[in-house]
Image (cartoon, grey):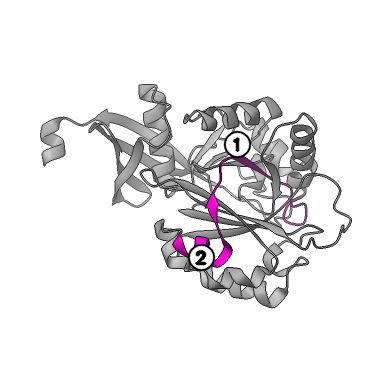
Amino acid sequence: MSRCATISQSLDESMAGTAATATTWLLLEQPGPWGAKALTASHLDRTLGRALEAAAKDTGVRIALIRRPGRHADPGTPPVRQVYAAHTVPGKVWLRSATTRAPRELLDLDFAALGAGDHRSFDVALGGEPHADSPLAFVCTNGKRDRCCALLGRPLAAELAASGVEGVWEVTHLGGHRFAPTVLVLPYGYAYGRAEAHAVTEALHAAQEGRVVIEGCRGSSAWEKPGQAAELAVREATGEYTAGVLSVVRTDGAAPHHWEVTVAHADGRAWRVTVAQSAALPPRPESCGASVLGTPARMNVVSVRELTTAALAG
């Protein structure tokens, strides 16, 4: 059977509006093998994993496990583990770094506050500080989740690490297996699909300079999927690649699977973007483990219209 990523690429399936949604990412180092649901199927304590899942539910925080690129036969759990937290909503984007000897300390976090962009509990519980080094790239490599992530993601992570690219980690799950290899770049939270080493390097370089690369971009995790597609459409229409200056300020559902999305610029400009959802045809496996064929949701940008001052006032 053909791999889901091969089929998606052969159909030239659009990736805009397919990123995982999370206002805040919480990433914990956990070496060794990962299961399909890694928080409860890895060498992380299963009870802790379930407690973290419950604590993060409906808060906007998405938790994932990370590990250094390389062999994962089972190197043993390190005494000190890396932890990152990143808030991706424009206007208060931040990336914090900490280490822990006791992952249970993560249960001391105020997850609702983290999801809203308040990192104080991260700093108090874990000794978190601003991440002062290069931006970070997380490559999905979890073959237990989908074989494409291992077959395509692990070589990408290894190539990036071997070439000296800093800030590269493997991660358990970013969604969208059929777009493998998939990558998340922090602090701004833009996800990429069908990624190649040169593209990831460019995305990291752009993030270092406060820019966004839109080629191969699936969207910003800060927004729901219609907003992701709308923001990328405004960037493409205006040539605005500065990170953190565009925000999805309103999404109105005019009809089932039809939205009017308002995207605002920090300089006062705004655009109304019409987004319509359709089924990506023909039916295909949405992951290599799918037992039935599916028709993934596709976000189609119908129009991008800049709003006048009068329209903004209204």
Apparent side of residue 145 relative to residue 225 in the rendered image (left or right) = right
- Please state the horizontal and vertical placement of residue 271, each as a whole percent of the image: 27, 33
**Please, what is the three-letter code of the amino acid marked with disc 2?**
Val
Q: Identify which amino acid the numbered label 1 is placed on.
A: Ser
Quarter of the picture containing the C terminus is top left
Question: Can you see residue 58?
Answer: no
Q: Nearer the viewer, mark 2 or mark 1?
A: 2
Q: In front here: 26 or 142?
A: 26
Q: In screen coordinates, is 72 left or right of 284?
A: right
- Give the quarter of the figure containing the N terminus: top right
Which quadrant of the view contains residue 52?
bottom right
Question: Which of 212/291 is in front?
Answer: 212
On the image, the x and y values in percent for residue 228 come to 43, 42
Task: Say which label, 2 or 1, has the lower sequence index.
Answer: 2
Does the magenta segment cover residue 151? no
Q: Residue 134's mark?
A: 1
User: Residue 96 in the image: x percent, y percent?
Assistant: 53, 51
What is the magenta range?
A: 120-146
Mark 2: give few (<14), some (14-19) or many (20+) Cα within 10 Å: few
Q: What residue occupies the far bottom of the structure in this picture?
A: 47
| 132 in magenta | yes
Q: Residue at x 59, y 60 (%)?
A: 63
User: Tag 1's secondary structure?
Assistant: loop
Provide the residue designation for mark 2.
124
Count every numbered label the image shows and give the total.
2
